[in-house]
Image (cartoon, grey):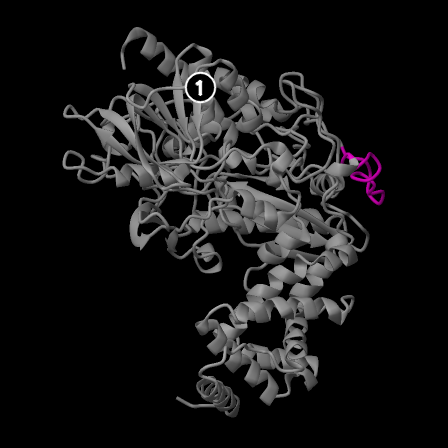
Amino acid sequence: MKIDKKEKAVVVIGSGPGGAQVAYQLTKQGIPVVLLEAGRRIMKEEYVNEEWPAFSQMAWLDKRTMSGNARIVKDFNGLPTWLVKAVGGTATHWAGATPRFLDYEWKTKSTYGSVDGATLMDWPIDGKEMKPYYVKAEDAIGSTHRGGRPPLPANNNYKVFAEGAKRNGYKFYATGPYGTNAAPYDGRPASIQDGFNFQGDKNGSKWNPNVSEIPKALATGKLELRTNSQAVQITTDSSGKADGVLYMDTKTKALHRQEAKVICVAGNSIETPRLFLMSASSRFPNGLANSSDQVGRNYMRHLTGSVYATFDKPVNFFRGETMAGFLADEVKHNPKRGFVGGYYLETLALGPSFLGAFLDPGKWGKKFADMMDGYQNMAGMWIVGEDMPQANNRITLGSAKDAFGLPAPNVHFDDHPNDTAMRNHAYEKGEAIYKAVGATQTYRVTPYPHTHNLGSMRMSAKAKDGVVDKWGRCHDVKNLFVSDGSVMTTGAACNPTLTITALAIRQGEYLADQLKKGNV
Amino acid sequence: MKITRRELLISAGSLLAYSQLGSLANAEVNIAAQPGDQEMIASMCKALYPHDRFPMSIYMDVAAGAIKKGNADTGAKISFRAGLDGLKINKFDKMNFKKQTKYLKSIENTPFFGLVRGHTVVALYDHKEVHKIFGYQGASFDKGGYKDGEYNDLSWLPEPRIEEHPDLTAFLDDSSPKKYASLKIKKTF
């Protein structure tokens, strides 16, 4: 449907897992929505099954600057994240892992206690409240191993991973839960084991909003999807309520304004706080909804890292699903290990093109070449664990300008000693898994540009402690919501997309109810 | 500051590059246009990422790309010229591998090295011939994906369980904040 720019509309900014889900929940209930997406719509036929061309096709490459002591600042300066600028957002690129938060992960301050230098805080919601939304989210995504949906088969990379795990005494390994169909589900086909989930999945077996919530919301007739429309400012009226969005057409650079009665922002953990900071005004001098000074702070990205190993026999780990292998044994908080929180190990395969760039950034010489030379005999896994929120790990507006003349965001990241301790523990365990099945060489790999970007608009019970309340509604601006992973108070060990989806379903239902009651 | 003989030679190379640029004021100067230049850069690419299995033609392709980047702007031209002259003066292509590595170590912080290494690691491992040599088959979508017996053809390990362990749900559900808060932390990190 076409919505007039002068009409006070419900405006959602960003069409990733958070924004697309909220838009779908609202339109499903008959509420018209304008959905602004900075990127274009890339249909699955256009996806490219080659690593660099696909990266160029969809990655968010607008100017960003970086600071801090994390190695990524040196290795990938200017590219702190690996996000997607397209309809469907970063879910276009996601692999598909869908674990849930553990109950205590909603309450880390109460559970872990005080950790020096960390800004741990309890979420204002808990596992019990979220449980039904997790079920809805798993059904929306079609997670394997859940809701009666079958598991994916074992590929070669998983065979090495699972047997190594078993020989180390681990029990909790499986090929999921994973957001790619093992059997046809929700109008999408079963996986044909063609890999390239990071490049969009041409077969459409992988869930992402571009093949699910977006077409469903369009089918309601209540959605206007405006692509190449990048929000640059949220404006407020004399009462301090949000009343419009200024956005630019990224092709013509023309600036437009959409009148709004409610705005939901889901631009991911860098662009969302950036938009709030760019929306500073005389009424909101430190940025919109920022009386707490928490906008942009406590940015998290999971600790991450990878372990690769070569064997004396072929593995061919690139064949089949990219990340359909899970190990949960190390996820539980166990301070005897020397750190708080826990982590998952998950299978991961890269092609030679990406592996060369990411195996050991900046490295060269014989040892590196020998590792690459073992490509056919290689297995790989990814570490994903809870990282500590820190007040100064934050998004600010830097002095550099992007191609549109707007202030480029600066991303500051220091590793917390807890992150480093956990990563080292995980490296050791990952290597032990591969050594148990005869690894001839193992390689500890530093974090890639981050795909899990969390925090920076944290949810809090009290207005002074965070940016949004338990519904994702800004403490300071009552008709302004945040609908993406940036609301995460703390990040837990699990991959975040399922939780972002669950929170967005919950928020969408709440917002629809409030709109019908005239409370917004 | 102590200047080594090698650094002096590199500086000399830069000066030479500058002077030549001056003398060709009206003609467009392209770097590494001399016979043998591409081979020299290729020998550097190979020393950086040495693979006996790769034919020299692959490194030549990579070198061509590096040279193109070296000609991309004036700054790149200046530093590329200096770096290439350093290789030539020191007869880099005639050194043994150990000496080549030592030489590369000595220029590791130069923009020239950064450009060639940065280009090589991407272009080399993205090269279609390299993919073939590595046994990487890449896209399979047009063939209907990897078939049963391809994506799971590893036979030197037993078939693993793919379902979750029956105790997993209980393991994950047993996560009450109160219980886990009682775990005593002696000293973390």
Note whether A8 is above or below A367 in the view shown. Answer: above
B101 or A30: nearer the viewer:
A30
Amino acid type, residue under disc 1 in the picture: Leu
Q: Nearer the viewer, residue B83 or A388?
A: B83
> What is the chief secondary structure element of the magenta stretch?
loop
Chain at tag 1: A
> Horizontal and vertical percent for residue A173?
67, 34
Name the element at disc 1: strand
Whether residue A471 is visible to the viewer of this picture, yes or no, is: no
Q: Is residue A432 above or below residue A119?
A: below
Query: For residue A273, what is the image quadrant?
Result: top left
Q: Which residues are magenta?
A: B144-160
Q: Which of the 4 image quarters holds residue A279?
A: top left
Q: Name the quarter where the N terminus of chain A is drawn.
A: top left
Q: Is residue A413 left or right of residue A138?
A: left
Q: Is residue A213 left or right of residue B61?
A: left
Q: In the image shown, does A332 or B114 lie closer to the viewer?
A: B114
Q: Estimate how packed mark 1 is, as few (under 14), some (14 to 19) or many (20 or more) residues with alpha carbons within 10 Å.
A: many
Q: Position of residue B39 (x, y in %)?
A: 68, 77
For the view shown, which residue lies furthest in the top direction?
A517
Q: Is residue B149 magenta?
A: yes
Q: Which residue is mark 1?
A: A223
User: Can you give x and y, in whole percent of width and height, for residue A388 in the image?
Assistant: 41, 43
Viewport quadrant of the C terminus of chain A: top left
Residue A99 is one of the magenta-drawn residues: no
Any part of residue B86 in sight: yes
Q: Residue B2 lies in what quarter of the image?
A: bottom left
Q: Is residue A82 above or below residue A457?
A: below
Q: Residue drawn 63% across and 16% down? A: A147
How far across and how far down the image is residue A186, in percent? Answer: 63, 18
